Amino acid sequence: MPKKFLKRYIPTPEKVHSIESLRFLGDILHEPNLWHITRHSVSRAFLVGVFMAFIPMPMQMLVAAFAALIINANLPLSVALVWISNPFTMPPLFYFNYKVGAWLLDRPVITFEFQLSWSWLGERIVEIGIPLYVGSLVVATILACFSYLLIQYLWRRKVRVDWQARRSLRRKDGT
C-alpha cells in the first residue's frame, strides 16, 4: 500500500486537532500512533473499518474510531473504511448478510417488503434480525481478517519490490 497515496487523502493530525467539535477528546487524539501510516497501523485500520462496515448498527464511525483507539490502528483510515457500507451499498450488503445468516441457521430466506413502522419492526425483528446479525458477524469477520492479511501481504510485497529495484540500480551504478 503506497504511503504517498494514503498521505494525500488522510487528514493530518493538525487538521483534526483544529476541529472545534473534537476538543472534548483532549489528549486522546495526540497519540502519534493513531496518525502514522505503517504496515501495522494501516492493516489494523482495515481490520476495524471493514469489520464495522458490515455490522448493521447506528454510529458505525464512532465505534470504529473507538476500536481504532484501543488497538492503535490508523484512526482516519478506520473511520473512512466504514463508508464501504453507505446508503447505496447497504441494501445489497445487508441482504447478503441476511442470506448468509439464514443459510448458517438453516432457516428459509423470507421474502419481505420493508415498512417503516414500529409494528412491522416488532413483528419481524426476530425472524429477520437474528439471521441478519449472525450473517453480518460471520461476513464481517471473514472480510476483515482477509483485508488485514491482504494489506500485510501487499505492503510486504511493495517493500520487497522496492528493495529489489534499489539493489539492481546499485549493481548498475557499481559496475
Image (tube, grey):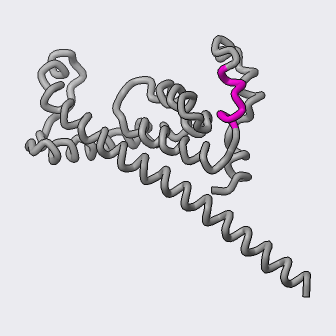
Residue 110 occupies quadrant: top left
State the residue in front, 31 or 118: 31
- Of 121 and 106, the residue lying toward us: 106
Q: In terms of image quadrants, where is residue 99?
A: top left
Nearest the viewer among 126 and 175 is 175
Looking at the image, residue 132 sits to the left or right of residue 37; the answer is left
Residue 83 to residue 146: above or below? above
Name the residue located 21 percent from the left edge and 18 percent from the top edge.
117
Most distant residue in the bottom direction: 175
- The quarter of the rendered structure image containing the C terminus is bottom right
Q: Residue sitting at 68 percent across and 56 percent down?
A: 2
Dominant secondary structure (helix, strand or loop) of the stretch shown in magenta: helix
Rendered location of residue 39, percent (x, y): 62, 50
Residue 56 higher or lower than 123, as above or below: below
In the rendered image, residue 119, in percent from the top left (x then y), is placed at 15, 16
Residue 129, horizontal then vertical, whole percent = 21, 30
- Residue extending farthest top: 24
Q: Residue 22's image quarter? A: top right
Residue lying at 63% horizontally and 56% vertically, measured from the top left = 1
Percent x, y of residue 95: 26, 42
Q: Nearer the viewer, residue 119 or 130?
A: 130
Left or right, 86 with reference to 121: right
Q: Is residue 34 magenta?
A: yes
Q: Is residue 1 above or below residue 59?
A: below
Is residue 56 covered in magenta?
no
Residue beneath the point at 36% across and 27% down:
57
Q: Is residue 159 left or right of residue 54?
A: right
Number of marks? 0
What range is drawn magenta here?
A: 28-35
